[in-house]
Image (cartoon, rainbow, N blue to C red):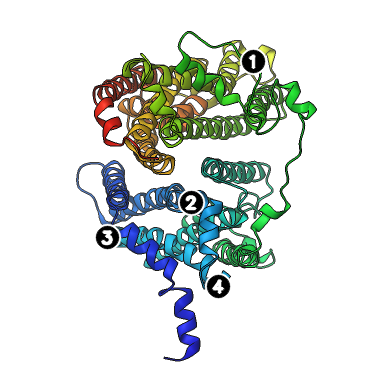
Amino acid sequence: MPVFVRWLLRLGPTNPIAVRLVQNGSRRTRHLYIRAAYLAVLIVVLLWLLLVSAGGGNLDYRELARAGAMSFTSIAYLQIGLICILAPVFMAGAIAQESNPRTWEVMLTTPLSATQIVLGNLLGRLFFIIALLMASLPLFALVQYFGGVPGRTILASYLVAACAAVLVGTIAIALSVSRLVGRRAVFAFYVSVVSYLALTAAIDSWVRLSGGGAGGNGVTWMTPINPFLTLHALLNPTAYPRADETGPWALRHPVNAWCWGSVLLSVGLALASTLTVRTGGLQMIAGQSGGVPWYRRMFGLGASGAEHRPPRHVWTNPIAWREAAARNSTLGRIVARWSFIAAGAAWGVALVWMFHTARFTNADFRLAMLFTTIGELAVVALVAVNMSATSISREREDGTLDLLLTTPITPAEYLSGKLRGLIAYLLPLMAVPLGTLALAGIYALTGGLGRAGGVTETVQQAGGLPAITVPVVLPEAGLVASLVVVPFIAFCAIVGMYWSLKSKGTISSVVATVGVVGAISGVIGVCGWRAGVDASLIGPFLAGLSPASVVFALVAPLEAMDSTVRGSGVQAARVTLLVGSVCAAGLYAAIVYGVHSYTVKNFDFIVRRLAGVK
């Protein structure tokens, strides 16, 4: 075999690191469950969408093709979302494990070159993501039997998803090589991905509403840098037109721009990682300073890394206090938490003020409210998942759990304290999106305080039907959203605690929690979102089962509950949505109680089985 070919093989297929990662990962049942759950979610959602889109009765070929096209569009978006969720899951090990200095010390003593180290980690972990995409290809191919979905579009959607996975994977490897991050960076990685996608999508919608897109309502400069917008331009060429031949290349070919841009950026990050992998990454420029800086003294903190800290007041339940109060033990966490609260509260007031002063139209205000509240709820849910999934496994790793088991604290008190402390810590964060919705609802309830044009709009119906008057935001928005959001966050916390107790380490518990919560909330959210639009009466009830769909229904009642509003009126839709939200609160509360009881019952067995594991 030629030397050049052997060298290429050592970079990829026969790379020792890639081979080790693929062989070890293929033996893990967790990866098998993830692949099975991934396909199961796609199959269930596709079947549901086909049933909802096709309806009943006899269908002609045109209606069947329309149903197939609509189902493929929704499932393609879901696949991009799942890839963005699962790619960090498979790359989490690269961030946490390889960021350990001891791991690098061993790896750098091997005869592997810098290129082999970087590409081995990247290709070995990307293999499982690409395998997920290939596993779902036959499912997408079946949609072609219904018509309306060309094979070229299916392949292009897969190319968009694959480029997104490669870019996310390369960023994870770059973080690992920097050696400035550790296990905490996994959570920051998730938050950064979600925030970037939400921010670029919000800017794109803002520009389009202002008439700044291609042709006034077409692609923008945000389209080629966001995989969801790129997919939207691919699947909706009429409603989301591209620029004409005189426009910039990126606006004329957003799919090509996204693919080439992500590939070039991935190559650049991989090259930078290769150049710094043996020089200590960015860790060589990080330093520590002695003394207690003024900004740490302002928050009542001691020196960084000090053995003694200022005394604090402990609650009656020390477990609950530790989860709620002791998590603010570092300056970064204090600043991040209160910055989120202050910025979110200020932005919520600014939204209502700009709407009151007519700087926002009704459509602008709804869009801004929708992106703001859903984005903030996504961040709060990720914080809940990260905190709960590491609450017990972290104590097992550092030996704290062994000490707690020698105290008179019972398993029920321990787990209840954990859950209470987590919810107490998250309540101020949940108050940001809920307070924004409550402020908008109160503003609508008071009639807009004399706003010119009011806070309602009249929509004309076809066929001589009477016009419909719909409020810009439902007055009960804050109350209804609270009924769903608080129990849902408690559901995320109890699921994270269960996997944190059952898993050996923090990474595996975070991965399992993200998979379970993401799959359940994704399926319920997509089904509730579509059912709210298409199904009469039962649609708003199902929309109330998910925080995202209930926020959509509260902020844009006509768009989110179209069939019910036009068929039975706005009041019927509001009542049905409220009933669905109450049932959702009871359902999530029952799940929390059931998981808590099961975990308490099996606490001793699980702890004994994993005794000594660190």
Left or right position of 354 against 48: right
**Cα separation between marks 2 and 4:** 19 Å
Residue reaching furthest to the left: 58
Residue 69 appears at what percent x and percent y? 36, 54
Q: Which residue is tagged 4?
A: 113
Nearer mark to the viewer, of 4 and 3 = 4
Please tell me how crowded label 4 is: few (under 14), some (14-19), or many (20+) other residues with Cα within 10 Å: few
Q: Amino acid at mark 1?
A: Gly
Residue reaching furthest to the right: 294
Residue at 55%, 65% in the rendered image: 108
Left or right position of 384 against 220: left
Please tell me how crowded label 1 is: few (under 14), some (14-19), or many (20+) other residues with Cα within 10 Å: some
Q: Amino acid at mark 3?
A: Leu
Nearer mark to the viewer, of 3 and 2 = 2
Residue 62 appears at what percent x and percent y? 31, 55
Instruction: Name the residue nearer the viewer: 163 or 298.
Output: 298
Q: Amino acid at mark 4?
A: Ser
Residue at 73%, 23% in the rendered image: 357
